[in-house]
Image (cartoon, grey):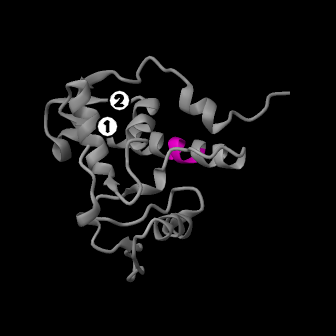
């Protein structure tokens, strides 16, 4: 009987496309332009997120820019970055469940406009709880706009 692959295993799984720099696909050029795009490595995202200090924040855009820069590409693939960010977050929660004290602080990663990520484990409520514990104030959702960290720009960490 096959057991479910853990998030930690997914994080460490190597794939030939991870870290590969490719030309921006034609269907993405309207939004991104021409140039090169890196398919990030999940562990590279994990390592980058681990550098975020307590009380500081980063946006997904910052992560993508840094990953692209580190690999010599113009852009980081937004789709795989999002998928791998989810894997990083779920692996961190798995680690917490197993009793580990030092885990990847994925909750410090915000969407580009400072909003919380509903796709993280436990949704925006869990992310908000973690951020409040670290001293951040959360502005509630307005209509379809998700909750956001108040004055998040003042707490952004340079990567």
Q: Position of residue 72 (x, y in %)?
A: 20, 25
Residue displayed at 33% across by 50% down: 60
Which quarter shows the C terminus? top left
Q: Secondary structure at mark 2?
A: loop
Q: Which mark is residue 39?
A: 2
Question: Label 1 to label 2, Cα distance in Å?
Answer: 6 Å
The label on residue 77 is 1
Tell me what residue is drawn at x 61 percent, y 34 percent. Answer: 8
Q: Considering only vertical position in the picture, is 29 above or below 145? A: above
Task: Give the quadrant of residue 111.
Answer: bottom left
Question: Which numbered marker is on residue 3?
Answer: none
Spot occupied by residue 151 in the image (x, y as percentages of width and height): 27, 72
Q: Is 6 covered by the magenta stretch?
A: no
Q: Which residues are magenta?
A: 86-90
Q: Is residue 13 left or right of residue 45?
A: right
Dominant secondary structure (helix, strand or loop) of the stretch shown in magenta: helix
Say which element carries label 1: loop
Q: Tell me if mark 2 has few (under 14), some (14-19) or many (20+) residues whose alpha carbon lies within 10 angstroms of its own.
A: many
Residue 89 located within the stretch drawn in magenta: yes
Q: Is residue 4 left or right of residue 21?
A: right
């Amino acid at each position: 009987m096959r057991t479910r692959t853990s998030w930690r295993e997914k994080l460490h799984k190597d794939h030939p496309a991870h870290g590969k720099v490719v030309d921006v696909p034609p269907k993405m050029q309207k939004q991104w332009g021409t140039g090169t795009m890196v398919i990030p490595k999940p562990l590279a995202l994990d390592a980058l997120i681990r550098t975020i200090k307590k009380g500081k924040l980063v946006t997904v855009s910052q992560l993508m820019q840094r990953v692209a820069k580190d690999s010599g590409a113009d852009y980081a693939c937004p789709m795989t970055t999002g998928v791998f960010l989810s894997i990083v977050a779920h692996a961190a929660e798995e680690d917490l469940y197993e009793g580990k004290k030092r885990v990847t602080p994925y909750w410090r990663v915000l969407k580009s406009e400072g909003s919380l990520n509903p796709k993280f484990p436990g949704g925006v409520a869990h992310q908000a709880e973690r951020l409040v514990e670290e001293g951040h104030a959360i502005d509630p959702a307005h209509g379809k706009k998700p909750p956001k960290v108040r004055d998040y720009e003042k707490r952004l960490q340079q990567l």
